Amino acid sequence: ARYEGVILGYIFFVLATSEYRKTLKIAHEQALYVAPEHRSLGLATKLVEFAEGDLKGELDLVIYHAPAANPAFGKLLRRRGVELYAEYFARRL
């Protein structure tokens, strides 16, 4: 998302075929960023809606990564009807 050439935010996906079901085409969201001064204005929702609209028809599944450090993204996804698909655990080494 840009305004007068300035990047306000972006969403980035990696497209892949499932390792387990070769007919399943997946988009893995890797990053969603909205500049701090543009947060709480609905830009994240608009980025997700735009991306899903662009991916629809070409892929079977979109997987979002909502880190525990950013509960607002999880809330946004739940409001849009995105279902919990998997739960990840991680340990810093």
Image (cartoon, helix red, strand yellow):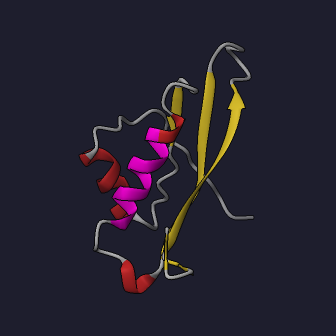
Q: Is residue 52 magenta?
A: yes
Q: Is residue 50 above or below residue 19?
A: below
Q: Is residue 25 left or right of residue 7?
A: right
Q: Is residue 18 above or below residue 21?
A: below
Q: Residue at the location (39% across, 62% down)?
A: 44
Q: Position of residue 35 (x, y in %)?
A: 47, 80
Residue 3 visible, this orientation: yes
Q: Is residue 39 above or below residue 23?
A: below
Q: Is residue 9 above or below residue 47?
A: below
Q: Nearer the viewer, residue 79 or 56?
A: 56
Q: Is residue 44 left or right of residue 9?
A: left
Q: Outermost residue, left direction?
A: 79
Q: Is residue 23 left or right of residue 45?
A: right
Residue 32 visible, this orientation: no
Q: Position of residue 75 (x, y in %)?
A: 29, 55
Q: Residue at the location (70% across, 17% down)?
A: 20
Q: Is residue 49 magenta?
A: yes
Q: Residue at the location (43% across, 49% down)?
A: 50
Q: Residue at the location (67% across, 14% down)?
A: 21
> So how many labels did they put on this image?
0
Q: Nearer the viewer, residue 56 or 40?
A: 56
Q: Position of residue 36 (x, y in %)?
A: 43, 83
Q: Position of residue 28 (x, y in %)?
A: 61, 42
Q: Nearer the viewer, residue 52 or 36?
A: 52
Q: Is residue 67 left or right of residue 42?
A: right
Quadrant including the C terminus:
bottom right
When asked about the image quadrant of residue 70, the answer is bottom left
Which secondary structure dominates the residues rendered in magenta? helix
Q: Nearer the viewer, residue 71 or 46?
A: 46
Report the span colored magenta.
43-53
Q: Outermost residue, bottom direction?
A: 37
